[in-house]
Amino acid sequence: ESGLADKIGTIMLQFFDGGQVSFIEDLVKKRSGDSLLIYTSTPAVLALKKNLSEEVLAKVSLVPVKNSSRLTIEEGREMRFVLTPTSKLPEALSAFDPLTGSLFSGKFFSAHRAIGENDSAVDSAGIEGWEAYVEDWYHLF
């Protein structure tokens, strides 16, 4: 859709693995409006500054998130941020919308496991075998 890129004014980047760079570069180059606001953790801000082109960095505002940070979405509605670093994702953050009770957890509740001999990283929908972790998840939540 023409002008769609200009309708995106804010991005909440919950983790950084490098894959976001090309998306942000393309989005910023298609925009004609104000700076793109990117809310993210301080480690992700540093990674973006290293990986985005100078041209794109001039057209974005990187906003480092703290546990007390809030983003006003509309009158009377705000997103609240919580830093959720892990050893795998030290830059991770989650966001909470108190109005709807929605938690945007990024990869915080994802499972990481080695692919076994009988597993296929390509042919799997990614949900097979989750029952093996039910007991662990019970204690997590």
Image (cartoon, grey):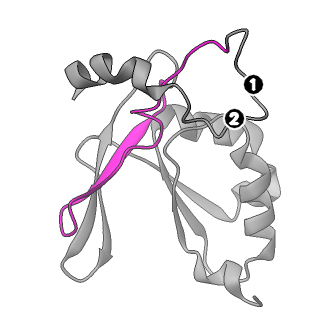
Percent position (x, y) of residue 45?
A: 56, 41
Residue named by callout 1: 120
Percent position (x, y) of residue 71?
A: 32, 63
Please, what is the three-letter code of the amino acid marked with disc 2? Ser
Residue named by callout 2: 124
Percent position (x, y) of residue 60?
A: 63, 61
Question: Is 123 one of the magenta-colored residues?
Answer: no
Q: In the rendered structure, which segment of residues is drawn in magenta?
A: 90-115
Q: Secondary structure at mark 1?
A: loop
Q: What residue is drawn where x is 46% and y is 43%?
A: 106
Q: What residue is drawn where x is 69% and y is 78%?
A: 5
Q: Are marks 2 and 1 in contact (CB under 8 Å)?
A: yes
Instruction: Say how many tags the image has.
Output: 2
Q: Which mark is residue 67?
A: none
Q: What residue is drawn where x is 52% and y is 25%?
A: 129
Mark 2: few, some, or many residues within 10 Å (few <14, many ≥20)? few
